[in-house]
Image: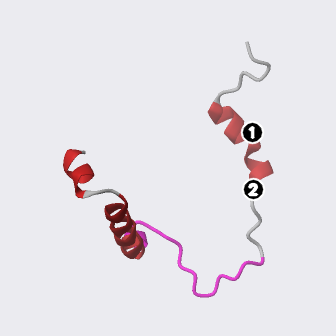
């Protein structure tokens, strides 16, 4: 058996305090946390996603897209 037989969950929970990031002092004026009611991520990603697929269409020929 390995020397450290903790589960992934146990390892993660045991290291949480070590990996914590102090948020004190960060500017928060105008910052709105993401929630189920307010989550504009999909809207923010539309332009990036469209550019990604334009690039993919340039990289791979039509035959690739028709076959796969």
Image quadrant containing the N terminus: top right
Residue 61 picture location, percent across and down: 28, 57
Q: Who's the residue at 34% across and 65% down the image?
A: 58
Residue linked to disc 2: 20
Residue at 69 percent of width and 40 percent of height? 13
Question: Which residue is rendered at x = 34% and y = 71% of the image?
Answer: 50
**Total count of labels:** 2
Q: Residue furthest top?
A: 1
Mark before the other along the chain sequence, 2 or 1: 1
Instruction: Choose between 29 and 60: the one closer to the eye.
Output: 60
- What residue do we see at 63% from left, 35% from top? 9
Q: Which residue is mark 1?
A: 14
Q: Residue furthest left?
A: 66
Q: CA distance from mark 2 to mark 1?
A: 12 Å
Q: Is residue 47 left or right of residue 19?
A: left
10 Å neighbourhood of mark 1: few (<14), some, or many (≥20)? few
- Please tell me in which quadrant of the rendered image residue 20 appears: bottom right
Task: Tell me the quarter of the picture where residue 46 sits.
Answer: bottom left
Location of residue 52 with respect to 8 vertically, above or below: below
Q: Which residues are magenta?
A: 25-42
Q: Is residue 37 magenta?
A: yes
Does the magenta portion include 65?
Answer: no
- Circle 2 packing at 10 Å, graded few (<14), some (14-19), many (20+), is few
């Amino acid at each position: 058996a390995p020397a450290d037989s903790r589960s992934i969950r146990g390892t993660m929970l045991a290291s949480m305090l070590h990996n914590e990031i102090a948020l004190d002092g960060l500017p928060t004026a105008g910052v709105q946390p993401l929630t189920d009611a307010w989550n504009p991520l999909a809207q923010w990603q539309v332009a990036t996603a469209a550019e990604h697929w334009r690039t993919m269409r340039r990289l791979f020929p039509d035959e690739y897209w028709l076959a796969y």
